[in-house]
Amino acid sequence: MVPLSPKSVLEGRNSDRTPLPFIIGLVVCGSCSLVALAYYVLTGGVGSTLLSGLLALPTVVVLVGLVLLIDRLEPEPRMLLVLAFAWGAGVAIVGSFIVNTFGSSLLVPVYGPDMAELLSSSVIAPVVEETFKGVFLLLLLLFRRFEIDGPTDALVYAALCALGFAFVENVLYYQDPLLSGEQVAPVVLMRGVISPLGHPIYTAMTGLGISHAATHRGFGRGVAVALGWSAAVLLHAMWNFSTAFGNGGLALAYLVELAVFIVLVTILLRDRRRLVALIGAYLPPYIPSGLVQQADLQMLGTMRGRKQARAWARSQSGLMGARAMSDYQLAATELALLHDHAVRATIPVDKFHERRNAILGLMRVARDAFFQRAPKVAAPPWTPQGEQSGFFRPLSNLETARLPTYQPSAQTRQLPTALSTTRLRTMRMSARRDWAGHSGGSAGGGAPGGGAAPGTPASGTPAPGTGSPGSSGQANPAQGDPATVPGTTVPAGRTGAAPGGQPPTGQPPAGKPPAGQPQPGQPPAGQPPAGQPPANRPPPGGPPPAGGRPPQPPAPGPQPDRQQRPPQNPPPQNPPSQHPPSR
């Protein structure tokens, strides 16, 4: 079987072929764009349509470039970005034109031409246009929910959809003065220079609601989408209605939109810091497995460090090496975002492990591609002298038994849905303390080329009965306490087994010693705790201990996680008191 390309892995596809839904969507959007183009040519001619398109093109090129700049840290699939723009320039523009024209024709006989135009632009157009643009975001929420990892992703899709809509709409607005013989410069100045962000700001409100729904659980998801769409309609209606009050009304509406734009920029900056904090919070538990090292986390957590690593890779292995390093960095970022979904309990367990296995496989492919071109390279600049980066370690030797696990629980679902930077910093410190006290040697990973893919069920799981604590100088990590990412839980009995599986036969639950061995910090069975006098065992067949409960023989296999009680003295024939003996 031919391995998938890194792009297919990151986009969650099981084939390198172009997805059929994307092809269908592109054909539909393109057909609608051709309908709009044909209308412009038939009503205004080829010359005016071509000139209007050239006047509208610079604005959309600049703004699309800025949107892609925002999307650099965790890029979205290119096919979805193209489809978002095409939806706005095709389906949304044609659907809105048809409904707006029909609604305006109904209002003219009742209110007259002037009032009907004002009502159509201030009431009908905002509702219709924001609905058609928001449908694409809603489809993403329903079918590609895991592509929206936060506000930045939703705002990127919303902005591209709105820019496609605004581009085709501007062609129409620029064409009208050309056909009527008026000056086109004021229209281009207003729509293309002074207020080119109108449609992106409106649709961004819907995007924020979609972002909340994609990253949260519960009834509030639908409410957030409705509120975001309502805010988009209100802002759009305010701008269109302000034209009835001249320059003063436009200036006031412009100040309101400027304030909203500043809020959106603040959200983007905060979300960028959140994403960097996710890398520092969720990837440190992977250090014991050898996947990353502390220096790698510092490199992955800053754009400057990432750029430095790509430049080093290019100097050592050429363009292919830089591309491999870029894939490695992006896979690490996707891994942190995957754990963020786990903390929010917005991803099923099987989907989590399937996605993580694919990401780990991509990191292995990226590393192998790099070292095929450059088997011997200089020390990377982001690691201190004497230390080695996790990028240099073959993933076939990855200690899969010490990989963090994810199992949803009631505690996971009750976690706060919005993680602040302070909360993430606390989680990161807690994870470091956990790993500081985590003991154990190296687990047996497969030999290069002979082991299973990282994260597969059998990898890193010792055979039943092999290896026991104290049998050698190296501890068996499968019998230790497996790493747990902050905010996730590991059910009792889950060790180095495959995600969703059970522990191998004969192994105790996670964090429990085998049967017959005392728990850490607890005296062996039959011995009282420190500071308590020894207690006599009842003779065979004698009276039961206090409380009337006869002693039960220990059950074979792992013992439950409860405090062992030392045996009690047999009660006298005539107990002086009914109170239970003191412990």
Image (tube, rainbow, N blue to C red):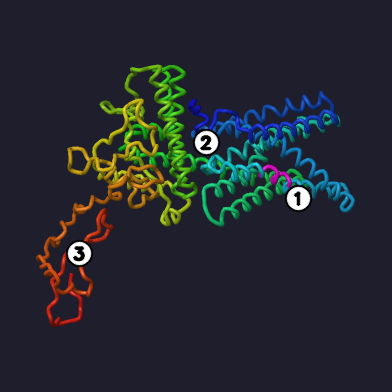
The residue segment tinted magenta is 128-134
Residue 421 x %, y %: 42, 46
Q: Which residue is mark 1?
A: 123
Q: Which residue is mark 3?
A: 565
Callout 1: 10 Å neighbours few (<14), some, many (20+)? Answer: some
- Magenta stretch: includes residue 133: yes
Residue 441 x %, y %: 24, 37
Separation of marks 3 and 1 at Cα, in angstroms: 75 Å
Residue 230 x %, y %: 66, 52
Image quadrant holding the C terminus, namely bottom left
Separation of marks 3 and 2 at Cα, in angstroms: 52 Å
Seen in the picture, residue 463 relative to 328 is either above or below; the reply is below
Q: Secondary structure at mark 2?
A: loop
Seen in the picture, residue 446 relative to 198 is either above or below; the reply is above
Q: Amino acid at mark 1?
A: Val
Seen in the picture, residue 434 relative to 304 is either above or below; the reply is below
| Magenta: main secondary structure | helix
Q: Residue furthest front?
A: 541
Q: Amino acid at mark 3?
A: Arg
In the image shown, does 330 or 350 lie closer to the viewer?
Answer: 350
Separation of marks 1 and 2 at Cα, in angstroms: 40 Å
Q: Quadrant of residue 169?
A: top right
